[in-house]
Image (cartoon, grey):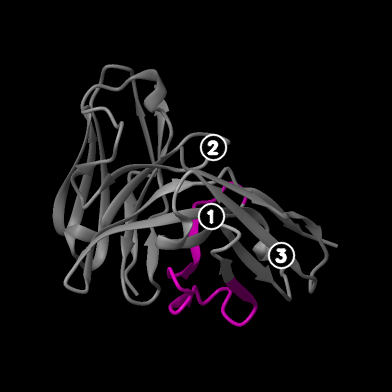
Amino acid sequence: EIVLTQSPGTLSLSPGERATLSCRASQSVSSSYLVWYQQKYGQAPRLLIYGASIRATGIPDRFSGSGSGTDFTLTISRLEPEDFAVYYCQQYGSSPRYTFGQGTKLEIK
Amino acid sequence: EVELVESGGGLVQPGGSLRLSCAASGFTFSIYALNWVRQAPGKGLEWISYISVGSSAIYYADSVKGRFTISRDNARNALYLQMNNLRAEDTGVYYCARDVADCSSGTCYEIRFDSWGQGTRVTVSS
């Protein structure tokens, strides 16, 4: 089973700053199968990035994804107030079919 | 507009059963695979089950295998999750999510959950 470890657990930044969130896999993951979601309090998750670097429809270009192998990164270039939320990475594998990281909470400093 | 609406959650005693439903609209339901994902209070997301387009491929997380059954009715645009022998650790919000991929020559890439319902809350407690 591939385990995804996200870091940091909590990231405290101010609007306008750059955010860098990490997702590390216990084994190599195909970039095609690495996904990022955003979840705001009390809401369902929202698809942000798939294929490690492809922005989903309607996602602003301040969000970008990168990485390969075991190390993946979600970058938010300039934080807007609405970006403060919890972010999850996810991978598609064989067993279990999908796994999520434990999440990174992005909070206002 | 794609819409997924879960229902059927509630309070149930340990050992009891519940059947969750997910009503879909705004897209051709029969050509998409679907998933159930849950979230315990204050915790992260946990994938629990997948069902393919024609129900020929079904997968479960180990945590629910043997207790939960996923099914779908393409004529009714509905996804279901039958939950039996419920435990306290099954408490949480249950989401249905549409599974999307780009497939060619029998291999699928860029798999993702592109639409989610708002969730239905399940509480297992005596």
The three-letter code of the residue at mark 2 reads Gln
Q: Using the rendered view, name the quadrant where residue A94 is placed.
A: bottom left
Query: In front here: A31 or B81?
Result: B81
Question: Mark 3 belongs to which subunit?
Answer: B
What residue did someone put label 1 on? B96
Q: Is disc 2 surrounded by few (<14), some (14 to 19) or many (20+) residues within 10 Å?
A: few
Residue at the (61%, 82%) spot, across then down: B66
Q: Is residue B52 magenta?
A: yes
Residue at the (31%, 61%) spot, across then down: A91
What is the magenta range? B41-70
Q: Are marks 3 and 2 on the same chain?
A: no
What residue did someone put label 3 on? B19
Q: CA distance from mark 2 to mark 1?
A: 13 Å
Q: Depth-wise, is mark 2 or mark 1 nearer the camera?
A: 1
Q: Depth-wise, is mark 3 or mark 2 nearer the camera?
A: 3
What residue did someone put label 2 on? A43
